[in-house]
Image (cartoon, rainbow, N blue to C red):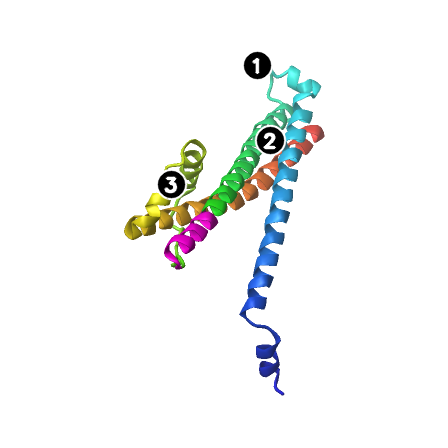
Amino acid sequence: MTESSKCSKGANQTTHDERHRFWTEQALNQFGFASNFFFLLSFAFFTFLMNREITKNLLPFDFKLSFSFSKFFFVLALVVGFVSIVYGALTVLSRLYDLRLTRHKTYVRKRYNKVKGGVLCDGDINIDNYSFFKKINVLYKSSISRAHFIIDKDIEDQQLLSEKFKDLRINNLLLARLSWTTFSYQIITLLISLFAYFLSVLF
């Protein structure tokens, strides 16, 4: 028996689906843990900076004083540390609404199958051309409105359903991409903040 024949008999489509579902769940759990961990770490480090004695001496600012590398890098650590917190908050929120849309998408599929007895098809969607600010806009709209949600009467109109379901999938993908992007930015800005604080101590 050849190796290829062994492979073909070793796993069927159901097995691959189960593996994909398992590892997807593992990835989501680990991502959720990591995003929460680094958000708390960014917040804790920023709190540490705010409680330093040098922070109390930053204001009022006197332009007559000579330039201080120590204060410069400390202020840089403060500013970038705050930016890291913002990115962390965006990561948590985008992931929250991403999961919310994923749950709704699953409900729509289940409802469509019950009403129409069919399956909603998934076509390929390319979101590479969507800007970062477009993703932020989707997050904002998702947090204040349910306009992109599909209600039961929408299922009766196949054309309307197809359009709204495609928009739902696009928004879902954009939020998922946003959460990974902001998570990366959060880690980068946190590292910059830590390095800036280290330099402020050296000077």
Task: Name which residue type carries label 3.
Answer: His
Magenta span of residues = 105-118
**Image coords of residue 167 (percent x, y):** 36, 47
Magenta stretch, main secondary structure, is helix
Residue closest to the eye, 111 or 106:
111
Picture layout, residue 146 above or below residue 116: above
Query: Residue 32: which quarter of the image?
Result: top right
At numbered mark 3, what does the secondary structure look like: helix, strand or loop? loop
Q: CA distance from mark 2 to mark 1?
A: 20 Å
The label shown at residue 148 is 3
**Image coords of residue 145 (percent x, y):** 40, 33
**Image coords of residue 163 (percent x, y):** 32, 49
Q: CA distance from mark 3 to mark 1?
A: 48 Å
Residue 113 in magenta stretch: yes
**Image coords of residue 26 (percent x, y):** 63, 53
Report the mark closest to the observer, 3 or 2: 3
Picture layout, residue 55 above or below residue 11: above
Q: CA distance from mark 3 to mark 2?
A: 34 Å
At numbered mark 1, what does the secondary structure look like: helix, strand or loop? loop
Task: Name which residue type carries label 1.
Answer: Phe
At numbered mark 2, what does the secondary structure look like: helix, strand or loop? helix
Which residue corresponds to mark 1? 61
Mark 3 vs 1, N-terminal side: 1
Residue closest to the eye, 63 or 89:
89
Structural crowding at the residue carrying mark 1, measured as other residues with C-alpha within 10 Å and reported as few (<14), some (14–19) or many (≥20): few
Q: Residue at x 69, y 21 (%)?
A: 51
The label shown at residue 81 is 2
CB contact under 8 Å: marks 3 and 1: no
Mark 2 vs 1, N-terminal side: 1
Task: Name which residue type carries label 2.
Answer: Gly
- Which corner quadrant holds the C terminus? top right
